[in-house]
Amino acid sequence: MTHKPREAIPMPDPTPLSPPDDLGERLATLGVKLDARAIGRLGDFLARLLAMNEHMNLTAITDPTEAWTRHALDSLSLLPLLADLKSGARVVDVGSGGGVPAIPLAIARPDLKFTLIDATQKKATFLAAVAKALGLTNVAVRAQRAELVGQAELRGVFDVATARAVGRLAMLAPLTAPLVRAGGRVLLIKGQRADEELEEATLVLMEQRCTHEQTIDTPTGRIVVLRVGPAEPRQPPRPRSGR
């Protein structure tokens, strides 16, 4: 007996969420300034995310006001750390899920190229659909496991890797660091246990050629900044000794 593939859930088209009255002030606290079009797109994204969440598990956040804080502002807390990236630079987001932090960042920095990776096909389908609905031509989506992507053609090609709510740092570093070029950065949005996770991941970070540069406290969480070092040169094979 063959099973027909499930049809993709149509992308909802709800009314965009209105921004909170103090959004400009809260963005300024992060060092971020957005124009009205970008804020409108953020409200559009959040509305679509919450609407689609009624059909599939994308987020535990269901309150619109909380969505602006936990999704939009938390994502945009990374924006100052992308300020030094030139137009055309490449950013990869691992375990994108419902599109956070990558979609808000792609809205704020349309000059950067974002690749969103999620192993779940239906989530990847949502990400591609919402990017199209928002007109984000700077977003590409891959329905693959990050560790496989990092072993193939995308190994070491990105300037920055980001991730949020994917897992503990010891598990996350091997998924993100291989995707980043030497000298690039890994930016991880973590909670209050960031220091504990860093200590736990000491050996893993060494194996992944990562150096902990800093941990930044933000109004919505903490950001762990890792720098990826150069790959170790391959040792030439030893000549066989003759008898």
Image: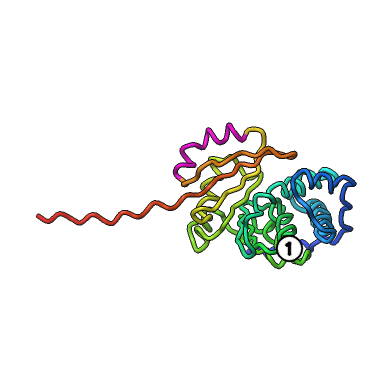
Question: What secondary structure predominates along the stretch shown in magenta?
Answer: helix
Q: What stretch is highlighted in magenta?
A: 194-207
Q: Which quarter of the rendering shows the N terminus? A: bottom right
Q: Secondary structure beneath disc 1?
A: helix
Query: For the point 75% across and 61% down, which residue is it?
Result: 130
**Viewer can see residue 8:** no
Q: Is residue 206 magenta?
A: yes
Q: Which amino acid does label 1 sit on?
A: Ala
Picture coordinates of residue 83, whole percent (x, y): 66, 54
Crowding near pointer 1: few (<14 within 10 Å), some, many (20+)? many
Pick whichever, 86 or 167, lies toward us: 86
Pick whichever, 236 or 165, lies toward us: 236
Pick whichever, 185 or 146, lies toward us: 185
Query: For the point 87% across and 53% down, which residue is it?
Result: 17
Q: Does the magenta stretch include residue 236?
A: no
In this image, 67 relative to 92: left or right? right
In this image, 104 relative to 212: left or right? right
In this image, 21 relative to 102: left or right? right
Q: Which quarter of the rendering shows the C terminus? A: bottom left
Picture coordinates of residue 190, whole percent (x, y): 65, 40
Residue at which label 1 appears: 131
Picture coordinates of residue 67, whole percent (x, y): 80, 46
